[in-house]
C-alpha cells in the first residue's frame, strides 16, 4: 500500500508541475510522464520506466485479484530507487 501511495505521489507531483508550468492537460498519468520528458524534466528512457510504475500502480488499485506477489517483490526491489531518481529529477528542474 505504501509503495502504491508513493507512485500516486509521483503522479500527483507530475500533474502539479505540468499545471504550474502551463504545459497543457495530460490525458492520463502515462501522458503526464511523457510531458515531463517533452520538457526535459526527465529523460525519454526514464519516462518509460515511470510509465511502467504507473501501470503497476493501476494494477494494484484496479486489478488486485490478479497481482503476482513475486512481481510486487521484484518491482519494489528496484522501484524505490526509481522513485528516488524521479524526485531528484523534479527537484533539479525546480532548482530545489
Image: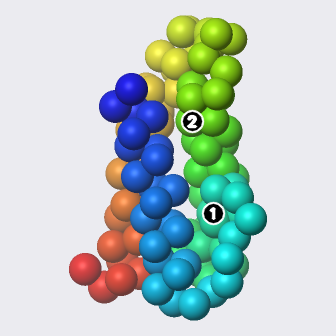
The residue drawn where x is 51% and y is 67% is: 14
Q: Nearer the viewer, residue 73 or 17?
A: 17
Q: Is residue 46 above or below residue 53?
A: below
Extreme-left residue of the structure? 96
Q: Secondary structure at mark 1?
A: helix
Extreme-bottom residue of the structure? 22
Is 71 left or right of 89, judged from the image as shown?
Answer: right
Mark 1 sits on what residue?
A: 33
User: In the picture, which quadrant includes the N terminus?
Assistant: top left
Q: Secondary structure at mark 2?
A: helix
Q: Is residue 11 above or below residue 91?
A: above
Q: Is residue 94 above or below residue 83?
A: below
Point out residue 28 in the picture as x, y percentages from the top left corner.
70, 58
Q: Residues within 10 Å of mark 1 (few under 14, many from 20)?
A: many
Point out residue 19 in the picture as x, y percentages from the top left corner.
53, 81
User: In the picture, which quadrant includes the C terminus?
Assistant: bottom left
The residue drawn where x is 40% and y is 33% is: 3
How far apart are labels 1 and 2 at the CA level?
Answer: 14 Å
Is 23 left or right of 20, judged from the image as shown?
Answer: right
Point out residue 56 in the picture as x, y percentages from the top left corner.
61, 33
Q: Mark 2 or mark 1, which is nearer the start of the sequence?
A: 1
The residue drawn where x is 59% and y is 51% is: 50
Q: Nearer the viewer, residue 9 or 81?
A: 9
Mark 2 sits on what residue?
A: 57
Point out residue 95 in the picture as x, y percentages from the top left corner.
31, 85
Q: Is residue 66 above or below residue 83?
A: above
Q: Judge depth for marks 1 and 2 and give the one in front.
A: 2
Q: Which mark is residue 63?
A: none
Q: Nearer the viewer, residue 60 or 52?
A: 60
Amino acid at each position: 500500500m505504501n509503495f502504491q501511495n508513493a507512485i500516486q505521489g509521483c503522479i500527483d507531483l507530475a500533474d502539479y508541475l505540468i499545471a504550474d508550468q502551463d504545459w497543457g492537460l495530460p490525458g492520463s498519468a502515462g501522458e503526464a510522464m511523457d510531458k515531463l520528458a517533452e520538457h526535459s524534466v526527465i529523460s525519454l528512457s526514464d519516462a518509460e520506466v515511470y510509465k511502467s510504475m504507473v501501470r503497476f500502480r493501476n494494477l494494484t488499485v484496479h486489478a488486485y485479484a490478479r497481482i503476482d506477489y513475486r512481481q510486487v517483490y521484484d518491482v519494489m526491489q528496484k522501484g524505490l530507487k526509481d522513485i528516488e531518481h524521479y524526485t531528484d529529477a523534479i527537484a533539479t528542474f525546480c532548482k530545489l
